Image: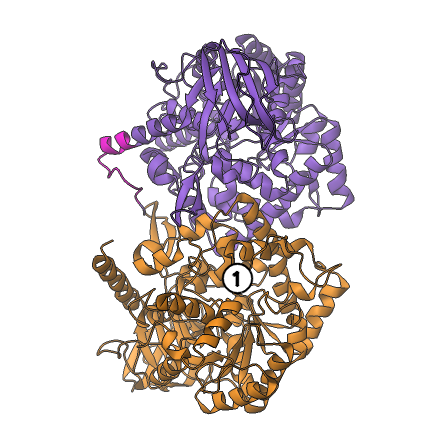
């Protein structure tokens, strides 16, 4: 009985440890119990994506010209166009004016020797988007990783930071396959948890020495960075050692400062000791508590009861200092001085303020895998499915909490702090790709103007990914000569309406027919000089979803409602 | 052409397109009644639709949330004789079984409400009936209201004067299964005296109205409702004991805003119109972009929200003074948050849980954005539009909450039948939105019950017979299996999904159990089933 319980617990823990909300204690235990052997049921595995088929993506080309496009370059510069963008293999080699707004394009423009021409007249070009917080579609959610890859690409995401994308070895292998374009996938930046990796034989990294050892080992194994949580095996001295050693090894760090350890390592402390990115909301408000560094938990609180965990989070809004106070400003100034990136991932918890909105989103029927849909349904053990009895009260608290969190993120942007866009889809009613566009909308709601939103989604992410390597001029994140050819082509102006980026499009009244129609969606996503038809990617995913429904004996249309 | 006029006139009576309404009035001044698509009301109440009233009925062992703001208290036996609550007796103590064989033992009807909550019937302060273009008949709305605990509605207007008057009387006689009806009408509606465009005519119409079963006046700030006409009508209404409520639309608000209307004696400001215009900062008229065209509804409703950064904000002297003045004038705020809530989150409204089963296909079509369906203004509704509305709603909600906090009266109204809002369901959403605005659950319930009743009866100089669970009051009650203070969502007819901890599966709980109006007990689930059947049959008929 005890054994059974433990193994069930372990399944739960290990299954979720790599994911958004971390149950650190138990993930440590699992490794303690069986540091080298396989756990009873390993964390949800991930099936590598099938190889890219002929016809999946065109190119790269010796020379490709994208003609007549309006450019939103990601740096914060205003849109400009029309321009012709020349790509040679995977590099942007020239951007030249193609005419003047309001006048016909100049005819016979150079170059004339392109292998591939894309007429983008009337379209907008942006740098490929960067999703700074992802996990791939694990095998309990989709048949293989291509489900998440294709939804990302279809929404213009050409780079992802996996935190982690998949188990260590699979993630590194997928990164390499993507780099070689053997798979249709975004670029992968592979962040991993301390102690992970089959080749690591040093056990739990619960001392500064062991932690440093693992960081050196993992850096040699080629990881791009480390994802940490504040948990019992990673007390402050260990986390500090990790931040420090990671810097020495030129790899990045990102922390989910979960409630289990945040009392001793809040975001301010983490920033002071060298952390690169604070992801989610955890740690911010805890740095601003009015009555000392421990949140006032409800006496019946049990962290393992996810409704307790996520219900209580929202109480931070009334326990923390208000916008405009000295404490609020000092906190932000301190983080800015330490060069900390905020990656708020507002989308992933947004269901907490409006569950019906999330559950009934337009895209579930066609694009959400049936097993992912099942995973979203509230139950005591599906991670992130914590809506056991989610009341008006709870939503109102979350609305209040989000207002404050948004205010913080916006103030940070306003003083010059760096904010990026991450989604963490695959939990809490958020579907890959769609969740990313929602994050853009939420940044706008927080007070970012549309160009600032795009900057956060492109240049800012790139800076944070390349800074640990000492590279302040990242090869992605802007559309500039000399940069990698990662770009998004869209028919609608996203600055006018980010909703046009959803794969399901935005509703607009057709003045001719006087009927609503869906417009937008990304037209093309170009990664490493390879042109993907975004609509085709979406069709692939829709077919994949249908086929899974057939396999599971479910109706092909719609989603089952409880 | 005739069809077109009908359409315009319908719109006019509802969310107000004052300019065109006036045109329609001009063209067919005496024909107001016939332009309403609903000429017949609801079918007569059938055998088995509602039980009672009874010589004596006892509702046993209930926890009472009495509507006055008092905390819940239990356990009580509520005795109803005819249509009145005759006594409320303690039945026992929390945590102990209640004594058996409690008096009275001679009741004709008993409801075991053990574990349940009893509240006063809810008051919806802003309703219209669906026209024939939205539902087969009025019972669609009536049943959805009753099924959500709404036992009293203020029609503003419910329909054309003749229809509204007849329906009001039929409901009073309980010939139809419907809430109590208060009949508010627009200036000039129903009479043969022509357009009301002078103070004298306004007084004349009000006197006519008072004699014709009309309980109050709904203003729109239409072109002819100039401040002098408006004020004369308010004054006459006061003399004759008629209530007044105004949608201070953009057409007239530049010269008659919320503050000015309150000073002139208006009872209720409905929607948001007029409030922010009383708080403009550095300008006297809202700054509209040059291409603005009021009859382009995306302009109208898109720009509404842009006022958020043109006004004196919370905490300023002007903000405080505005609220103090309105309180001094005894103005009721009836915010109807829900009816424009789609503006801040269109997808949510469009995909709401209840549409599939409870929205008639014709209402669904009406909701689709077109240039001429009123309130279907989402021609190209962007992230930016939703952002502005979120900001605007934040401000508007704070204004309502501040007003409540200083002792001002705020009520609950819905205005369903437009902008993705379905009768009854929208009422519960309005409660949630008050909660979001900062009203505690008890304050929310009080707004829905006692506050509405006061505003309805005050103009008559009467103590309200509804709005509280108390001996001597009319037996208008809602009985619910879940505690609404714990979760307002349990009031939705579609219920609430909760995880069953035994099975680790979600199940649907809640929904109103019984709605009692005038001592007649309606099974709320049966009412919902009736509506679902009506929707199903309409879908078959229309071929959807």
Q: Is residue B129 above or below residue A190?
A: below
Q: Is residue B369 left or right of residue B463?
A: left
Residue A293 visible in the picture = no
Give the colour in which the image draws chain A: purple
Q: Which chain is orange?
A: B
In this view, A334 is above or below A224: below
Q: Nearer the viewer, residue B294 or B238?
A: B294
Residue A78: image x %, image y %?
A: 65, 31
Main SS class of the magenta portion in the image: loop
> Residue B91 lies in what quarter of the image?
bottom left
Magenta range: A546-560
- The image quadrant that residue A367 belongs to is top left
* Location of mark 1 (residue): B337
Q: Does A332 lie within the magenta span?
A: no
Q: Chain of mark 1?
A: B
SS assignment at label 1: helix
Callout 1 crowding tier (Cα within 10 Å): few <14, some 14–19, many ≥20 = many
Q: Is residue A559 one of those drawn in magenta?
A: yes
Q: Is B526 placed above or below A395 here?
A: below
Residue B260 position (above or below residue A318): below
């Amino acid at each position: 009985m005890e054994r059974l319980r433990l193994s069930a617990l372990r399944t739960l823990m290990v299954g979720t440890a790599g994911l958004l909300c971390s149950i650190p204690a138990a993930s440590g235990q699992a490794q303690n119990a069986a540091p080298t052997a396989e756990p009873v049921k390993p964390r949800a595995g991930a099936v590598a994506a099938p190889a890219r088929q002929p016809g999946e993506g065109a190119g790269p080309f010796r020379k490709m010209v994208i003609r007549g496009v309006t450019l939103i370059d990601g740096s914060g510069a205003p849109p400009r166009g029309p321009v012709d963008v020349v790509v040679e293999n995977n590099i942007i080699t020239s951007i030249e004016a193609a005419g003047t707004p309001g006048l016909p394009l100049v005819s016979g423009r150079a170059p004339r020797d392109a292998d591939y021409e894309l007429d983008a007249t009337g379209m907008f070009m942006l740098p490929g988007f960067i999703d700074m917080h992802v996990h791939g579609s694990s095998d309990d959610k989709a048949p293989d990783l291509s489900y998440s890859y294709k939804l990302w690409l279809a929404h213009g995401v050409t780079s992802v930071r996996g935190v982690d994308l998949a188990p260590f070895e699979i993630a590194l292998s997928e990164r390499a396959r993507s780099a070689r374009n053997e798979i249709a996938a975004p670029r992968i930046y592979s962040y991993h948890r301390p102690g992970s990796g089959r080749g690591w034989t040093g056990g739990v990294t619960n001392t500064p020495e062991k932690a440093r050892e693992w960081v050196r080992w993992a850096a040699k194994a080629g990881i791009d960075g480390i994802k940490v949580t504040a948990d019992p095996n990673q007390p402050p001295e260990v986390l500090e050692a990790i931040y420090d050693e990671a810097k020495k090894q030129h790899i990045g760090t990102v922390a989910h400062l979960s409630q289990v350890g945040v009392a001793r390592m809040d975001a301010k402390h983490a920033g002071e000791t060298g952390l690169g990115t604070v992801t989610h909301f955890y740690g911010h408000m805890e740095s601003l508590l009015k009555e000392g560094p421990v949140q006032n938990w409800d006496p019946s609180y049990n962290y393992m009861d996810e409704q307790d965990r996520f219900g209580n989070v929202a109480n931070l809004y009334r326990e923390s200092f208000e916008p405009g106070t000295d404490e609020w400003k000092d906190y932000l100034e301190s983080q800015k001085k330490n060069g900390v990136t905020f990656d708020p991932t507002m989308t992933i918890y947004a269901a907490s303020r409006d569950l019906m909105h999330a559950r009934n989103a337009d895209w579930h029927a066609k694009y959400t895998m049936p097993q992912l849909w099942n995973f979203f349904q509230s139950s005591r053990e599906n991670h992130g499915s914590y809506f056991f009895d989610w009341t008006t009260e709870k939503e109102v608290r979350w609305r209040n909490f989000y207002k404050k969190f948004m205010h913080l993120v916006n103030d940070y942007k306003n003083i010059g702090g760096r904010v990026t866009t991450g989604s963490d889809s695959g939990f809490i009613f958020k579907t890959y790709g769609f969740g990313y566009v929602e994050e853009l909308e939420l940044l706008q709601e927080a007070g970012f103007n549309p160009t600032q939103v795009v900057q956060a989604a492109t240049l800012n992410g790139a800076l944070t990914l390349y800074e640990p390597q000492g590279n302040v001029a990242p090869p992605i994140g802007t559309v500039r000569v000399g940069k990698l050819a990662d770009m998004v082509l869209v028919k609608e102006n996203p600055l006018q309406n980010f909703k046009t980026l959803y794969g399901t499009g935005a509703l607009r009244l057709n003045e001719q027919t006087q009927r609503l129609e869906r417009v937008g969606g990304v037209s093309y996503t170009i990664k490493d000089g390879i042109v993907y038809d975004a609509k085709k990617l979406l069709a692939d995913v829709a077919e994949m979803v249908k086929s899974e429904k057939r396999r599971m004996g479910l109706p092909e249309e719609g989603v089952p409602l409880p | 052409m005739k069809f077109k006029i009908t359409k315009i006139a319908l719109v006019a009576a509802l969310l107000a397109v004052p300019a065109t309404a006036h045109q329609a009035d001009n063209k067919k001044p005496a024909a107001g009644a016939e332009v309403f698509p609903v000429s017949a009301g609801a079918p007569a109440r059938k055998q088995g639709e509602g039980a009672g009233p009874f010589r004596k009925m006892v509702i046993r062992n209930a926890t009472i949330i009495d509507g006055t703001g008092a905390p819940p208290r239990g356990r009580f036996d509520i005795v109803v004789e005819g249509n009145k609550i005759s006594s409320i007796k303690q039945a026992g103590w929390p945590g102990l079984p209640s004594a058996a064989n409690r008096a009275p033992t001679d009741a004709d009807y008993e409801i075991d409400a053990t574990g349940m909550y009893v509240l006063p019937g809810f008051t919806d302060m802003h309703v219209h009936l669906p026209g024939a273009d939205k539902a087969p008949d009025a019972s669609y709305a009536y049943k959805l209201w009753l099924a959500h605990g709404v036992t009293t509605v203020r029609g503003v207007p419910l329909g054309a004067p003749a229809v509204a008057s007849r329906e009001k009387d039929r409901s009073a006689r309980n010939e139809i299964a419907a809430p109590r009806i208060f009949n508010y009408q627009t200036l000039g509606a129903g009479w043969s005296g022509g357009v009301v465009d002078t103070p004298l005519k306004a007084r004349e119409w009000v006197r006519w109205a008072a004699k014709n079963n009309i309980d109050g006046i709904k203003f729109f700030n239409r072109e002819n409702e100039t401040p002098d006409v408006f004020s004369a009508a308010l004054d006459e209404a006061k003399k004759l004991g008629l209530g007044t409520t105004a949608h201070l639309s953009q057409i007239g608000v530049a010269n008659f805003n919320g503050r000015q209307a309150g000073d002139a004696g208006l009872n209720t400001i409905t929607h948001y119109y007029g409030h922010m215009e009383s708080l403009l900062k550095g300008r006297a008229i809202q700054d509209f972009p040059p291409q603005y065209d009021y009859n382009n509804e995306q302009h109208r409703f898109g720009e509404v929200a842009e006022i958020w950064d043109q006004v004196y904000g919370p905490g300023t002297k002007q903000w405080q003074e505005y609220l103090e003045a309105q309180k001094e004038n005894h103005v009721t705020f009836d915010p109807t948050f829900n009816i424009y809530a789609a503006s801040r989150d269109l997808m949510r409204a469009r995909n709401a849980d209840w549409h599939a089963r409870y929205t008639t296909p014709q209402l669904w079509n009406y909701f689709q954005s077109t240039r001429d369906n009123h309130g279907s203004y989402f021609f190209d509704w962007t992230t930016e539009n939703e952002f502005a509305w979120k900001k605007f709603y934040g401000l508007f909600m704070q204004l309502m909450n501040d007003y409540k906090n200083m002792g001002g009266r705020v009520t609950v109204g819905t205005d369903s039948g437009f902008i993705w809002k379905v009768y009854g369901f929208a009422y519960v959403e309005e409660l949630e939105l008050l909660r979001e605005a900062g009203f505690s659950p008890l304050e929310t319930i009080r707004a829905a019950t006692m506050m509405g009743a006061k505003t309805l009866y005050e103009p008559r100089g009467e103590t309200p017979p509804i709005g509280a669970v108390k001996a001597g009051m009319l037996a208008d009650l809602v009985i619910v299996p879940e505690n609404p203070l714990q979760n307002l969502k349990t009031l939705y007819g579609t219920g609430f999904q909760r995880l069953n901890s035994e099975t680790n599966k979600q199940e649907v709980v809640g929904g109103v159990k019984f709605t009692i109006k005038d001592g007649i007990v309606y099974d709320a689930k049966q009412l919902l089933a009736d509506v679902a059947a009506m929707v199903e049959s309409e879908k078959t008929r229309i071929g959807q």
